[in-house]
């Protein structure tokens, strides 16, 4: 299973508030599978650290989360799969943000389901299995 950036942010917020919120509940409902994120999600999380008004606190919180996750990188063939998915979306007039496409194609290339709060974008990627929550 791969987590989208929205899930990671929700997990960070839920942890800070000490609550069992929707992200934790969705993750628990999916069972004890290994949990991964894309290197592109790591990039987004680290960008958030740098933009924070409290960068040291955010760095500590996000590093704590990142240490518990498997970080997946693009494999051989990733550019071809990315191009095929991007072209299909553009031809159908349904493009999605580049980072969402990179994250989704990473999940697809590794044969993983993606857990996200943003089903609207990820569900457009052909062949990607998407699990959402609210």
Image: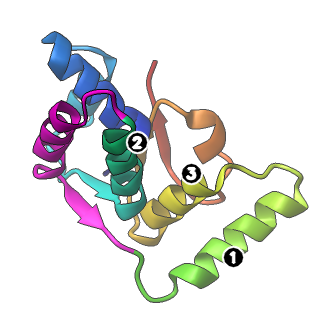
**Frontmost residue, 36 versus 9:** 9
Secondary structure under tag 1 reads helix
Q: Quadrant of residue 51?
A: top left
The mark nearer the N terminus, 1 or 2, is 2
Give residue 130's position: percent from left, percent from top: 50, 44
Q: Could you give the CA–CA distance between mark 3 and mark 1, rounded to whole angstroms?
A: 14 Å
Residue at left 48%, top 30%?
117
**Frontmost residue, 16 versus 4:** 16
Residue at left 23%, top 18%?
14
Q: Residues within 10 Å of mark 2 (few under 14, many from 20)?
A: many
Q: How is the image coloured?
A: rainbow
Q: Which residues are drawn in magenta?
A: 52-73
Q: Which residue is mark 2?
A: 5
Q: Is residue 45 magenta?
A: no
Q: Could you give the CA–CA distance between mark 1 and mark 2, rounded to whole angstroms?
A: 22 Å
Q: Which residue is mark 3?
A: 100
Q: Could you give the CA–CA distance between mark 2 and mark 3, rounded to whole angstroms?
A: 9 Å
Secondary structure under tag 3 reads helix
Please count the marks in the image: 3
Is residue 91 rendered to the left or right of residue 83? right
The mark nearer the N terminus, 3 or 1, is 1
Mark 1 or 2: the one toward you: 2
The mark nearer the N terminus, 2 or 3, is 2
Q: Which residue is mark 1?
A: 83
Give residue 45's position: percent from left, percent from top: 34, 45
């Amino acid at each position: 299973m791969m987590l989208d950036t929205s899930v990671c942010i929700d997990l960070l917020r839920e942890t800070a508030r000490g609550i069992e919120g929707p992200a934790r509940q969705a993750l628990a409902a999916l069972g004890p599978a290994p949990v991964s994120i894309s290197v592109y999600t790591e990039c987004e999380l680290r960008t958030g650290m740098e933009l924070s008004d409290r960068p040291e606190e955010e760095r500590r919180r996000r590093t704590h989360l990142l240490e518990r996750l498997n970080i997946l990188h693009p494999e051989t063939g990733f550019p071809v799969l990315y191009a095929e998915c991007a072209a299909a979306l553009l031809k159908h007039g349904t493009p999605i943000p580049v980072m969402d496409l990179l994250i989704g194609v990473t999940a697809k290339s590794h044969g993983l389901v993606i857990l996200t709060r943003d089903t609207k974008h990820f569900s457009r990627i052909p062949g990607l299995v998407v699990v959402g929550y609210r």
